[in-house]
Amino acid sequence: MELKRILLVEDSIRDVELILTSLAENNLGNEVVVVRDGEEALDYLYRRGLYRLRREGNPVVVLLDLKLPKIDGIEVLTDIKANEALRTVPVVVLTSSREEDDLTRCYELGTNAYVVKPIDFHEFVDAIKGLGLFWAIINEPPPGSMPPFRVSQTIQDGGD
């Protein structure tokens, strides 16, 4: 069974390290792809730029910070939920923003969850463990989130 891939969109090195450590402590062997800004997140999802040769399907979940350089999280969420091929990918907003406008806007755009990053280290680790366990193990991903079978690819790779 192929492990489900998680896309983490986070510009804070400290938060990236905490999130990766939290997931590892829960023994989640899922690959976590880390991108540092909204533009890189969209490049990954649309297979552009550095990710143009990416073969795997959509991630099982996108963990999305809101306050990002280049393209902010609200714009990334808007783009994901407006795209027919991506709109079923679960997006969990993982942010320090407690602003009611951000919360309301994210749910209007179709976020699957809105999690405020706890300030306390242990609470933060526990929150991430719970998110990782639910989205990567328990939740059933939407159809089409796994890589599609391509006949031409199989023949090309020597599978004839």
Image (tube, rainbow, N blue to C red):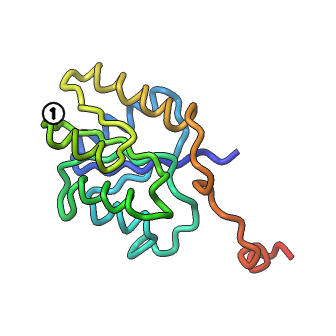
The residue shown at (36%, 37%) is 113
Image quadrant containing the C terminus = bottom right
Q: Position of residue 131 (x, y in %)?
A: 42, 31
Task: Please tell me how crowded label 1 is: few (under 14), some (14-19), or many (20+) other residues with Cα within 10 Å.
Answer: few
Q: Position of residue 129 (x, y in %)?
A: 42, 27
The residue shown at (75%, 80%) is 156
Q: Is residue 65 left or right of residue 2?
A: left
The residue shown at (24%, 53%) is 74
Name the residue type under label 1: Arg
In the image, is residue 117 above or below residue 75? above
Can you identify the residue that label 1 sits on?
98
Locate residue 147: give its quadrant: bottom right
Exactly how many numbered labels are in the figure? 1
The residue shown at (66%, 64%) is 148
Q: Position of residue 35 (x, y in %)?
A: 33, 56
In the image, is residue 82 above or below residue 119? below
Nearest the viewer among 100 and 54 is 100
In the image, is residue 42 above or below residue 134? below
Image quadrant containing the N terminus = top right
Nearest the viewer among 105 and 64 is 105
In the image, is residue 123 above or below residue 22? above
| SS type, badge 1 | loop
Locate residue 127: give its quadrant: top left
Q: Is residue 58 left or right of residue 130?
A: right
Q: Is residue 74 left or right of residue 101?
A: right
